[in-house]
Image (spheres, grey):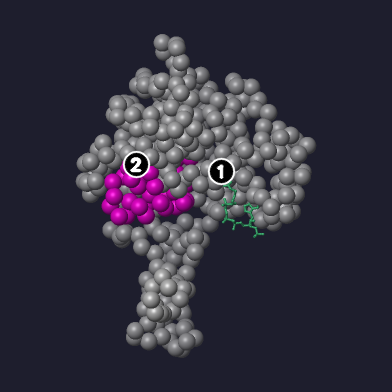
Amino acid sequence: MTTPNEQPGGVLHVTDSRTGRSYEIPISEGAVRSLDFRQIKTSDDDFGLLCYDPAFLNTASCRSGITFIDGDAGILRYRGYPIEELARKSSFLDVSFLLLSGELPAKDESAAWSAEIGKHTYVHENVKKFIDGFHHDAHPMGMLVSTVAGLSTFYPEAKFVADPARQREQVVRLIAKMPTLAAFAYRHAMGLPYAYPDAELSYAGNFLNMMWKMTEPRYRPDPVLERALDILLILHADHEQNCSTSAMRVVGSSHVDPYSAAAAAAAALWGPLHGGANEQVLRMLQEIGSVAGVPAYVERVKRGEIRLMGFGHRVYKNFDPRASIIKEVADQVFSVTGRNPLLDIALELERIALADDYFISHKLYPNVDFYSGIIYQAMGFPVTMFPVLFAIGRMPGWLAQWQENAADPEQKIARPRQLYVGEDLRHLDGELGG
Ligand code: ACO
């Protein structure tokens, strides 16, 4: 696939069979502008031609310089850097800096950025109080969505979204506080006291500290698990205009504060067809129960009774490059934690599915979530924390996209059109409630 800026410009000739009139619609960056179709009318009082695109299958909602995906070739790049190189050589915080600013930080910038994030990891003590108000079996993702939204009440200045300095403050706070909110949600569900951030640890290491610290005076994360988690966060950091990122942009386009917009994005992420998929993968593998149960399960999928969770992607139709990296991470994690018995079921499922005509013809391959859940489980995370981990990783992507949207002079409040297919004008007859 050529990138939009490699595409030659041109003109689309359109003839409207209703009127016989012809139009020239400019083509630029591999796209036509929907608004150029508005001039195509059957009469002066006609609204003009609309483009109908349920679920935005073929609509670019923005011009973006953040993430490039070529779904057919299995390519994913942040700001031009291949995901494979970033996963091997960079850190999650440096990748966050890259997504937000466009460049990887120099050594001193990286240290300053890390220190700045470290300084903002604490949350107001009142946040603990409203986490305390949740029921003991509340889903941590529900708690996260609510506490992210709740942060807007602690930082009322966040509403000044046009002020770059204020914008940056909220960006730092959101990235810094996500692991704290996530770990506090977990500790609340477990009935454990909250463990406070340790600024001497890395971003991932500190998160593990807040999750698992018990009576030891100082928590020391296992370096293999710490690095594995950091890589998983990098892999999830951005993925262009997916459901949750689109939610961030759409909600942010109303100029609401970024906490409210990020809460909406996190809510969108929670669905089982999106970030909730890795939780569903684990439940699916548990339901299959054994390698012997795989063929019967695959048959049910082919009969259309169920979907194979962790398979398929709207964009990747050959392979998901993140899935290949994740498989390597899995081996490193299992060398520390021991092998997750569900891995054998997953491998068998992948083997059978990849050789089966149904999956080949539907271009269904394992996506990033097929293996991430197995790794998270081996590291000790309960399944309910899986979408929460995804949300921590995706936060810098949401924020970079939100900033880009806010700075784009072509953007306005998002407001799609509809094709009205309901009742024509009608009137109430006689008495109401008769
Ligand atoms: N298992 C079985 N069949 C599938 C699957 C699957 N996982 N995914 C798609 N199909 C089939 C559909 O039944 C449909 O078949 P048909 O044409 O014979 O009716 C065809 O493939 C196309 O499916 P769509 O739903 O139109 O594909 P779409 O691009 O809209 O969906 C999605 C992408 C939502 C990811 C889908 O593949 C899915 O539901 N996968 C499982 C959930 C999952 O793993 N989500 C995580 C995505 S990655 C992420 O969000 C980070």
Which residue is drawn at the image coordinates 56% and 43% (left, top)? 277
Question: For the image shown, how many numbered marks are present on the structure?
Answer: 2
Q: Quadrant of residue 217?
A: top left
Kindly identify the residue that appears in the image at 48 percent across and 36 percent down. Answer: 139
The vertical placement of 319 against 421, above or below, is above
To which residue does mark 1 refer? 277
Residue 243, above or below 419: above
The x and y percentages for residue 27 are 42, 69
Dividing the picture into quadrants, the one containing residue 431 is bottom left
Looking at the rendered structure, the kind of residue marked 1 is: Ala
421 to the left or right of 312: left
Badge 1 element: helix
State the image coordinates of residue 271 (x, y, percent, origin top left).
51, 47
Ligand 1 is within 8 Å of the C-beta of the residue at disc 1: yes
Amino acid at circle 2: Ala
Note whether residue 104 is visible: no
Q: Is residue 312 magenta?
A: no
| Image location of residue 212, percent across then percent down | 47, 21
Q: Is ligand 1 within 8 Å of the beta carbon of the residue shown at mark 2?
A: no
